[in-house]
Image (cartoon, helix red, strand yellow):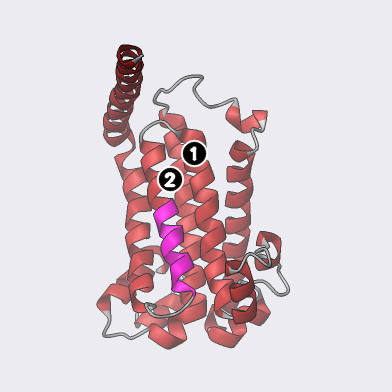
Amino acid sequence: MINDDRANSSWVARHLLDLNETCRKIILSSEANNLSHLGGVLRLDLDIGVWEERLKGRPETKQLGDARRELAFAIFAASTGLYRLAYAGLRVFLELSFAAVYFSANELHRRQWIGDRKDFSWTSALDMESGVLSKSFVREFTPEAVDDAAQYARVAAQCYRHCSQFVHGKDVTTGLLPQSLAYSSEIVTDWAVSGRHAAESVLYLLYCRYSAEIFDLEDTEVCNTLEHSFSHLRSIRSLLGLPVEGV
């Protein structure tokens, strides 16, 4: 029996190590062919991390940290050929990020959610009348962001739906996935575009909710996170003291 167990253990180890080697080769292909796409998502994650650092001590920051961890796993999955997991992780990243901001203005709901007495509703969080990127919500925290918030709500909703198609096994999307653990430049690019849109919508959401509390022109790190992704928006350029003519 001991010998059989050892033989089985050896077989399992070889199988897992073979998969690991396949993933290593996929990483090299991803790095060689999709570096700018994946790097763009990584940079946005770091930008979100700057805001997370400024928000330390707030109750909802735990959910934001969990969201970034899911994004990190999703980036790794996208780089190693675990594509369905990559889309699933990106969806969780969106859910937890928007939940963090929703809970920041709904402490009772946050406590009920943590206590497993109430669920978080993605649909409610994206509601155009009362959601966290609705005019009524944004106006109370960053009025100058009201005009642009709706477009980022639409982007987040579209990204969430796209990821959900992979999660639920919709043939229109999962039919594009490799049938085995293998590299696909097209899928990595598609995921990275979704990842960039998701991360930008989250970063804009953080700006809408917290800029009045943490923004400081002397804080170059925070300023850079906004300039990286939103320098095309008049409200952001005005905030950063950049020229707005012709924008």
Q: Are marks 1 and 2 in contact (CB under 8 Å)?
A: yes
Which residue is at 36% across, 33% downward? Answer: 80
Q: Residues within 10 Å of mark 1 (few under 14, many from 20)?
A: some
Vertical side of 65 occupied by 106: above or below: below
Amino acid type of the residue tagged 2 in the rendering: Ala
Which of 88/147 is in front?
88
Q: Which quadrant is the C terminus positioned in?
A: bottom left
Q: Position of residue 26 (x, y in %)?
A: 33, 28
Q: Which residues are magenta?
A: 60-70
The quadrant in which residue 213 appears is: bottom left
Image quarter for residue 104?
Answer: bottom right
Name the residue located 31 percent from the left edge and 22 percent from the top edge. Answer: 13
Taking the magenta stretch, the answer to whether it contains residue 61 is yes
| 60 shown above or below 152 | below
Provide residue 232's location: percent of width, then percent of height.
Answer: 44, 67
Residue 243 in view (yes/no):
no
Residue tagged by mark 1?
A: 85
Main secondary structure of the magenta stretch? helix
Q: Is residue 168 left or right of residue 217?
A: right
Answer above or below: position of 175 versus 84: above
Q: Name which residue lies at 57% across and 67% down.
A: 99
Give the x, y percent position of residue 36. Answer: 32, 44
In the displayed structure image, the side of residue 166 where residue 42 appears, left or right: left
Amino acid carrying label 1: it is: Leu
* Magenta-colored stretch includes residue 121: no
Depth check, front residue: 97 or 203: 97
Residue 74 is labelled as 2
Q: Residue at x 26, y 85 (%)?
A: 218
Q: CA distance from mark 1 to mark 2?
A: 7 Å
